Image (cartoon, helix red, strand yellow):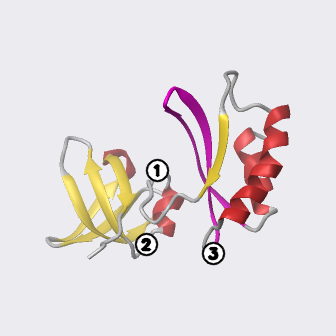
């Protein structure tokens, strides 16, 4: 069983789901970020509970050889879409896409499967295979 699967089991035992894992460097500090989701939303207490369970597990099964800080949080209302499951769970939401080659697309995610997505844009429905996507994220229209 790989590390991500084991982390997912700890999160699921707390009634949430693993969204993604990121390793980022901010202000010369390495952060092992575990992003979680839950129907009805993620609150600070849930993040703290999961962090308290993950911390000793990661002390025994370190995710990397260098020093890091563990952070457990929600991916937020505007979140990166990197896996087919992310796209499937975001159907009906507004998305911004950067297509490999430089084009940008905004619209509503209409459908997603294991091969690609369909986005409803002002020009009509546009289909993209995952391999053609540079970056993708949901966005919230604050107006």
Identify the residue at image location x=60%, y=72%.
41
Q: Nearer the viewer, mark 1 or mark 3?
A: 3
Magenta residue span:
16-40
Q: Residues within 10 Å of mark 1 (few under 14, many from 20)?
A: some
Name the residue carrying label 1.
82
How far apart are the alpha carbons under marks 1 and 2?
14 Å
Drawn side of residue 65 relative to residue 92, left or right: right
How far apart are the alpha carbons under marks 2 and 3?
15 Å
Identify the residue at image location x=80%, y=50%.
52
Q: Earlier in the sequence, mark 1 or mark 2?
A: 1
Residue in the foreground of this view, choosing between 111 and 24: 24
Drawn side of residue 89 relative to residue 139, left or right: right
Tell me the quarter of the image containing the N terminus. Answer: top right
Q: Earlier in the sequence, mark 2 or mark 3?
A: 3
Q: Quadrant of residue 122?
A: bottom left
Residue in the foreground of this view, choosing between 104 and 75: 75
Image location of residue 26, percent across then percent down: 49, 34
Task: Indicate yes or no whether the magenta region holds residue 62.
Answer: no
Identify the residue at image location x=79%, y=37%.
58
Image location of residue 12, percent across then percent down: 76, 62
Examine the rendered structure and indicate whether residue 14 appears above or below residue 32: below
Q: Secondary structure at mark 2?
A: loop
Name the residue carrying label 3.
39
């Amino acid at each position: 069983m790989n590390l991500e699967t084991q982390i997912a089991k700890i999160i699921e035992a707390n009634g949430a789901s693993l969204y993604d894992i990121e390793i980022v460097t901010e202000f010369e500090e390495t952060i092992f970020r575990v992003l979680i989701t839950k129907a009805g939303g993620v609150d600070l207490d849930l993040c703290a509970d999961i962090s308290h369970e993950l911390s000793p597990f990661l002390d025994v099964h370190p995710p990397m050889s260098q020093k890091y800080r563990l952070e457990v949080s929600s991916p937020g209302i505007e979140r990166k879409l990197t896996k087919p499951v992310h796209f499937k769970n975001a159907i009906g939401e507004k998305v911004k896409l950067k297509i490999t080659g430089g084009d940008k697309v905004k619209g509503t995610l209409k459908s997603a499967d294991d091969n690609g997505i369909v986005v409803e844009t002002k020009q009509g429905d546009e289909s993209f295979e995952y391999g053609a996507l540079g970056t993708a994220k949901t966005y919230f229209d604050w107006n």
